[in-house]
Image (cartoon, rainbow, N blue to C red):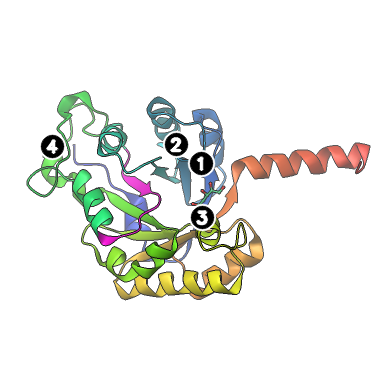
């Protein structure tokens, strides 16, 4: 068999793709989300209680559905990146990328020598479908999609160079970390933050790459879609459940 097609990578140049943040860290919740119509899911290994085995369970659970999984790592650790790729992650998001040098190191962690330094898992890994994928080592990179997060003042200052790094496919703005980093704690809508978000979007597009963002508030998501963001996470599963639960109980017990 050939290396599996990555529909998320292929879709980056089309219409805006709408996704949901997946924070429950179970295959069962991930599978429910995958049946609802979202184009992609962010399996969050940074702030949700995920481990490599729980991420694997979610990749397996959503594999049957037209909803592309994006896996966010907790760090830049090449050993963790190797494990996430070996379990079959094809779209990988890495938080807190501040320089082009960091971006280039991350690209190298996803490539086999001589292009990079990814270790060889071979027939032990789901990525190779236990050895069934022909020429995995020479073709894997074609279907890998690397998304780097810009979410600090230095990241925005270096956005042009980060986006232009060969092997970086997309830049994802982290609006909450960015606003907090520059002193507008938890306020992505502050005008200074909005200017920086727009600058990062423009720099990313100038480099010919796709840009994404998290926008759980509808008005913000619509504005970012109008600006031209290519993929937007418009919901967070934890918040969606909590909101629906609160509204349901309030209908019977009223606001206390
Ligand atoms: O800075 C941001 O915004 C993000 O990177 C997303 C947050 O980490 C997300 O977990 C908020 O729920």
Q: Are marks 2 and 3 in contact (CB under 8 Å)?
A: no
Label 4–label 2 contact, CB within 8 A? no
Q: Is residue 85 visible to the viewer in this orientation of the structure?
A: yes
The residue pinned by badge 3 equals 177
Q: Secondary structure at mark 3?
A: helix
Q: Residue at x 17, y 45 (%)?
A: 111
User: Which corner quadrant holds the N terminus?
Assistant: top left
Locate residue 227, reporting x and y percent. 50, 74
Instruction: Return the residue at label 1.
Output: 34
Looking at the rendering, the stretch of residues picked out in magenta corresponds to 89-100
2 w.r.t. 163: above or below: above
x then y, percent, for residue 101: 23, 57
208 and 188: which is toward the camera: 188
Question: Going 40% across and 34% down the picture, which residue do you hit?
Answer: 59
Q: Is residue 51 located in the magenta-colored stretch of the structure?
A: no
Mark 1 / mark 4, whichever is N-terminal: 1
Q: Nearer the viewer, mark 2 or mark 3?
A: 3
- Spatial CA distance of label 2 from label 3 is 28 Å
x and y, in percent, of residue 210 in the image: 36, 64
Q: Are marks 1 and 2 in contact (CB under 8 Å)?
A: yes
Q: Which residue is mark 2?
A: 62
Q: Which mark is residue 134?
A: 4
Badge 1: residue crowd in 10 Å (few <14, some 14–19, many ≥20): many
Packing grade of label 3 (10 A; few <14, some 14-19, many >=20) is many
């Amino acid at each position: 068999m050939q290396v599996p097609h990555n529909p998320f990578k292929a879709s980056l140049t089309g219409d805006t793709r709408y996704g949901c943040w997946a924070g429950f860290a179970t295959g069962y919740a991930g599978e429910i989300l995958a049946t609802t119509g979202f184009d992609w899911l962010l399996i969050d290994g940074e702030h949700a209680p995920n481990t490599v085995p729980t991420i694997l369970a979610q990749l397996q659970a959503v594999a049957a559905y037209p909803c592309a999984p994006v896996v966010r790592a907790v760090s830049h650790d090449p050993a963790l990146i190797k494990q996430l790729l070996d379990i079959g992650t094809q779209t990988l998001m890495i938080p807190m990328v501040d320089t082009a040098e960091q971006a280039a190191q991350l690209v190298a962690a996803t490539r086999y020598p001589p292009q990079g330094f990814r270790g060889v898992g071979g027939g032990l890994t789901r990525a190779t479908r236990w050895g069934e994928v022909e020429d995995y080592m020479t073709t894997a990179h074609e279907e890998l999609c690397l998304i780097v997060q810009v979410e600090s003042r230095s990241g925005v200052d270096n956005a042009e160079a980060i986006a232009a790094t060969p092997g970086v496919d997309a830049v994802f703005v982290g609006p909450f970390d960015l606003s907090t980093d520059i002193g507008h704690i938890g306020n992505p809508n502050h005008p200074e933050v909005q200017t920086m978000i727009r600058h990062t979007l423009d720099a990313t597009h100038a480099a010919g790459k796709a840009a994404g963002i998290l926008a759980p508030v509808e008005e913000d998501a619509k504005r970012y879609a109008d600006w031209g963001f290519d993929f937007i996470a418009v919901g967070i599963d934890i918040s969606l459940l909590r909101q629906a639960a609160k509204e349901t109980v309030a209908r019977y017990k009223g606001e206390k």
